[in-house]
Amino acid sequence: MKRRLSIATCSPYPFPCEPPWRWQTPVLQAALKYNDSVYDALYSALAIEHRCDFATADRALANKSQGVFPFIVHLSAIKP
C-alpha cells in the first residue's frame, strides 16, 4: 500500500499546514478592499477560517478594523 505524502504529513509542525496558494486570491482582494497589508489580511483570513479572535499589538489595525472585523482586538483589550 502506497502512502500519500502531503504538505501536512511532511510538516515539522504539530499542526496542519495549508498550501499558501489557497489564500492568495482572497487575501490579496481583502488587502486591496480594506487598504491593509497582505500580512494583516492573511492573519484576518486565518482568524475567519478558524473562527477565532485575532489579537494584535498594532493599535491602528485594531482601531480601523473594529467596524468591519470585530474579532480583531488590540492586546490591551484582553483581560488576564
Image (cartoon, grey):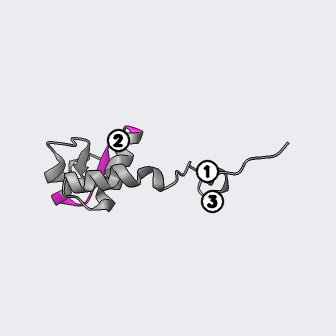
Q: Are marks 2 and 3 in contact (CB under 8 Å)?
A: no
Residues under labels 2 and 3: Cα distance? 25 Å
Region of the chain picked out in magenta, as a range: 50-60
74 lies left or right of 5:
left
Residue drawn at x 41%, y 51% is 23
- Which residue type does callout 1 highlight? Ala
Which residue type does callout 2 highlight? Ile
74 and 7: which is toward the camera? 7
Residue that sits furthest to the top in the current view:
51
On the image, the x and y values in percent for residue 47 come to 36, 45
**Where is mark 2, residue-wise?**
48
Labelled pair 1, 3 in contact (Cβ < 8 Å): no
> Foreground mark, 1 or 3?
1
Q: Circle 1 sits on which residue?
A: 8
Q: Position of residue 54 (x, y in %)?
A: 31, 48
Q: Where does label 3 land, which residue? A: 12
Q: Residue at x 35, y 47 (%)?
A: 45
Q: Residues within 10 Å of mark 2 (few under 14, many from 20)?
A: some
Q: Is residue 58 magenta?
A: yes
The three-letter amino acid code for the residue at tag 3 is: Pro
Q: Is residue 59 above or below residue 69?
A: below
Left or right: residue 37 compared with residue 65:
right
Which x, y percent locates residue 80? Answer: 30, 47
**Real-space Cα separation, disc 1 to disc 3, in angstroms:** 9 Å
Residue 58 is left or right of residue 2, and the answer is left
Secondary structure under badge 1? helix
Going by the image, does 34 lie left or right of 46?
left
Res 37 label? none
